[in-house]
Amino acid sequence: DQQVKQNSPSLSVQEGRISILNCDYTNSMFDYFLWYKKYPAEGPTFLISISSIKDKNEDGRFTVFLNKSAKHLSLHIVPSQPGDSAVYFCAATPTILTGGGNKLTFGTGTQLKVEL
Amino acid sequence: KAGVTQTPRYLIKTRGQQVTLSCSPISGHRSVSWYQQTPGQGLQFLFEYFSETQRNKGNFPGRFSGRQFSNSRSEMNVSTLELGDSALYLCASSPRGKPDNSPLHFGNGTRLTVT
């Protein structure tokens, strides 16, 4: 049962344009969401997060949007740069159930390629 | 500040053997989590340790176990290895283990191959 889904395995965008990566979830207990970026042969790197009490969070070129009613979140990267080419994972956790701890459920990832 | 260190980077084992993987968290971090990454299942949560106690556990069989030492270093053990255990095992640490104010910092993983 895939509780966090990233339906697009890959995305190709031109440099300078907007990249939009999507993620859907099914577990209504999830209340905190994160995006991680992963390069080959490295561990995932934290990008940005959002709590369920918000619908938007920005950090530089990265913005995450959360639509709770649709159980959908998206990551916008503007402008996209070649160095952004990586696999992007969304993750979710039900903080109220984990005793404040870490138990992330990850999506399967989207390979972003930013072309010159 | 040194990052999360996992040893060894690569490991080849035979079915039926057991294996121990090691993780040294970032200095001062008390929470250590383990994840398994496979092409078919993606990143899956194994367990989390905080102050030497297992705080959360994923849906893996009892062959997968872990522990945390007083210096926050952690080990995970897989007994009676199966071919399906071949994966990248990732360790992650955070200061207090609360995802809302201390996101996970991942190591580069241990690539386990079971033949």
Image (cartoon, grey):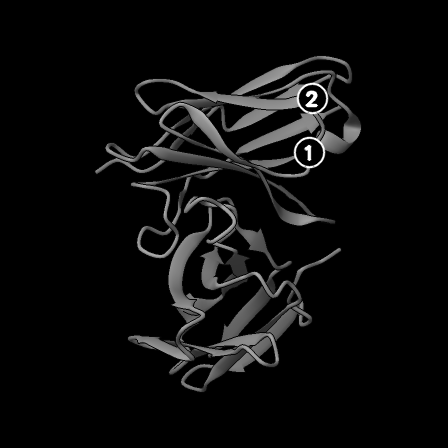
Q: Which residue is labeled 1 in the image? A: B60
Query: Where residue A35 sits: x, y (%)?
Result: 46, 63
Q: Amino acid at mark 2?
A: Arg
**Circle 2 Cα neighbour tier, 10 Å, few/some/many (<14 / 14–19 / ≥20):** few
Q: Which residue is labeled 2 in the image? A: B63
The chain ID associated with circle 1 is B
**Circle 1 Cα neighbour tier, 10 Å, few/some/many (<14 / 14–19 / ≥20):** few
Residue located farthest toward the left when viewing the structure as drawn? B1
Residue located farthest toward the bottom when viewing the structure as drawn? A17
**Quarter of the image where one finds residue B5:** top left
Q: Amino acid at mark 1?
A: Phe
**Same subunit: marks 1 and 2:** yes
**Quarter of the image where one finds residue B32:** top left
Locate residue B27 relative to residue B58 in the image: left or right.
left
Query: Where residue B78 sits: x, y (%)?
Result: 64, 21
Viewer-nearest residue: A111 or A65: A65
Q: Are marks 1 and 2 in contact (CB under 8 Å)?
A: yes
**Quarter of the image where one finds residue B68:** top left
Residue appearing at x 61%, y 17% in the figure: B19
